Amino acid sequence: MEGEQLQRARSIVAVAAKERIAARTAAGQSAFEATPFSHVDGQIRVDQVENPSFFEFDEQHQSYDIYWGGYEYVIELDRIRTPLELLSWVHHLLEKEWELTTPRRIGELIEDVSHRRGWSLHGV
């Protein structure tokens, strides 16, 4: 039963991501900006990814779209108001043990959030 619920949840996420891609494309954004993944058999899979970070910042929704788990995982920027909250999110993402999570990608996410928030990473 639990496996069926997980599959249904993944399917719902895949449909939602596909709809979001269509909305971004309709708004004049490129397919790459929309997502570095393609929709196949109810799943989203990596398909010749050109974005090595596997995340993007959605200016319209002020959120990060993270694809390290093989599907879109969204974190709104207003949920990362302090460096401690950023650390908490990094810990949360690392607990997921997603295959595409790497130290470099975590570092790039930390740098991007810090830049958007105006935080110094190196005490300068």
Image: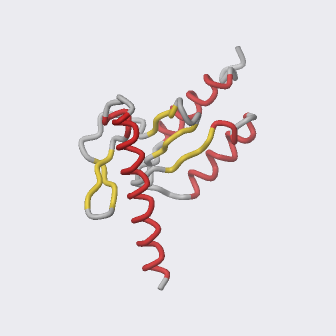
Q: Residue at x 42, y 53 (%)?
A: 71
- Given the current orientation, which residue lies at the most extreme bottom position? 1
Q: Residue at x 54, y 58 (%)?
A: 96
Residue 85 is situated, as x and y percent measured from the top left of the image, at 72, 41
- Given the current orientation, which residue lies at the most extreme front position? 26
From what the image shows, is residue 32 above or below residue 95? above
Q: Residue at x 33, y 61 (%)?
A: 43
Please state which of residues 102 and 73 is positioned toward the viewer in this rendering: 73
Corner quadrant of residue 52: top left
Q: Is residue 47 left or right of residue 12?
A: left
How many numbered marks, from 0 up?
0
From what the image shows, is residue 13 above or below residue 84? below
Q: Is residue 96 left or right of residue 34?
A: right
Residue 30 is situated, as x and y percent measured from the top left of the image, at 32, 31
Please state which of residues 114 and 17 is positioned toward the viewer in this rendering: 17
- Given the current orientation, which residue lies at the most extreme top position? 124
Please state which of residues 119 and 122 is positioned toward the viewer in this rendering: 119
Corner quadrant of residue 63: top right
Q: Residue at x 42, y 45 (%)?
A: 20
On the rendered image, what quadrant is the C terminus found in?
top right
Residue 122 is situated, as x and y percent measured from the top left of the image, at 66, 20
Colour scheme of the rendered structure: secondary structure
